[in-house]
Amino acid sequence: MTGKKRIVVGMSGGVDSSVTAWLLKQQGHEVIGVFMQNWEDDNDGDYCSIKQDSLDALSVADIVGIDMEIVNFAKEYKDRVFAYFLAEYSAGRTPNPDVLCNAEIKFKAFLDYAMQLGADCIATGHYARKLVRDNRHYLMKAVDDTKDQSYFLYRLNQSQLSKALFPLGDIRKSEVRRLAHEAGLPTAAKKDSTGICFIGERPFREFLQRYLPTSPGEMITPEGKVMGEHMGLMYYTLGQRKGLGIGGQGEPWFVAGKDIPANRLIVVQGHDHPMLLKHTLDMADLSWTLDAAPEAGDYTAKNRYRMPDAECVLSPVENGQARLTFRDPQWAVTPGQSAVLYDGDICLGGGIIM
């Protein structure tokens, strides 16, 4: 990036966005910080840190020497992200709200707001890189592969990527912490957030109960043997081991499926039970970072965030759906989660697992 730019930085009150703002200011750009308030229900409770996060962001802005605004996107978040989140759980699937939050809030509502401020581009504290070649914007994995967040950004298109900067993509997390300490930023030692995007680190079951009715039912084996009672299908995800209440019978038990019409949770014994292993997955609601589906062929893919890339073959994309066939069986492929396709370090996009 050449020349001085007006850059609007999404400030979360965490160390990553703090260092992002500091780096861009050091490079001589005109930097404006924006703290997004995207959740209003009970944001004065024990599990929501919006107030503290906004204070931290303001403190950082003061030290870095930039103006900062607090902008409310709560309506957009509720309409575009949270409604989908609840609908997916109601249907027995397991959505990833961070993926939708990036596509709909950080790189749509926030991006639109930044453009109204006269920004040349926006910047976030995501660990990802961008390569521009022949006027095409390639979303790339971060240098720090333990922190790479390209998986969560796979729904960005060329228009969004053309306006986005990821200053931390070439930096390791340990270096980000070191820079924050050297700059005297108050977020230097702040713990990373692990909660639902913008909602915080609440007890998940208790949180969902406030929005969706619970419907307990039988917990059965594939052969139909009743093993216990589940609290409601929405509280369980494929591959889940904890919280089943089945013990003392040899190998551990795992969630392997959901019989939605009968409101039954299917459980199996043993980590490598055949019901937990799949060689293929189908995905819909496709989104491609280069605005066109890749050619059929050999790639790698992730079907959940914390997993190594797995070799696969992409079948021809037809009728808005795609199939991935993996060389090695994949464990606990979960409907509602995202499968993300890579060509080396290039994130091509992906879709929602059916």
Image (spheres, helix red, strand yellow):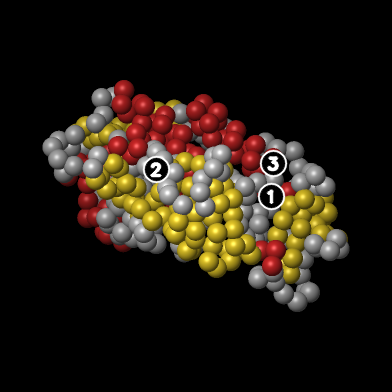
Of labels 3 and 2, earlier in sequence is 3
Q: Is residue 59 left or right of residue 289?
A: left
**Residue 97 seen in this snapshot:** no
Question: Please, what is the three-letter code of the amino acid marked with disc 3?
Answer: Ala
Q: Determine which residue is flagged by label 2.
A: 289
Disc 2: CA contacts within 10 A as few (<14), some (14-19) or many (>=20): many
Q: Determine which residue is flagged by label 1.
A: 235
The residue sitting at 24% across, 51% down in the picture is 184
Residue nearest the viewer, comparing 45 with 291:
291
Residue 262 location (% of width, % of height)? 83, 47
Q: Quadrant of residue 56?
A: top left
Residue 5 location (% of width, % of height)? 19, 34
Query: Mark on residue 67?
Result: none
Of labels 1 and 2, earlier in sequence is 1
Question: Please, what is the three-letter code of the amino acid marked with disc 2?
Answer: Thr
Q: Is residue 309 left or right of residue 170?
A: right
Q: Quadrant of residue 281?
A: bottom right
Give the alpha-carbon distance from disc 3 to disc 2, as whole Å: 28 Å
Disc 1: CA contacts within 10 A as few (<14), some (14-19) or many (>=20): many
Residue extending farthest to the top is: 116
Of labels 1 and 3, earlier in sequence is 3
Give the alpha-carbon distance from disc 1 to disc 3, as whole Å: 12 Å
**Residue 346 seen in this snapshot:** yes
Residue extending farthest to the bottom is: 250
- In the rendered image, the vertical position of residue 37 relative to residue 229, given as above or below: above
The residue sitting at 54% across, 35% down in the picture is 81
Q: Determine which residue is flagged by label 3.
A: 91
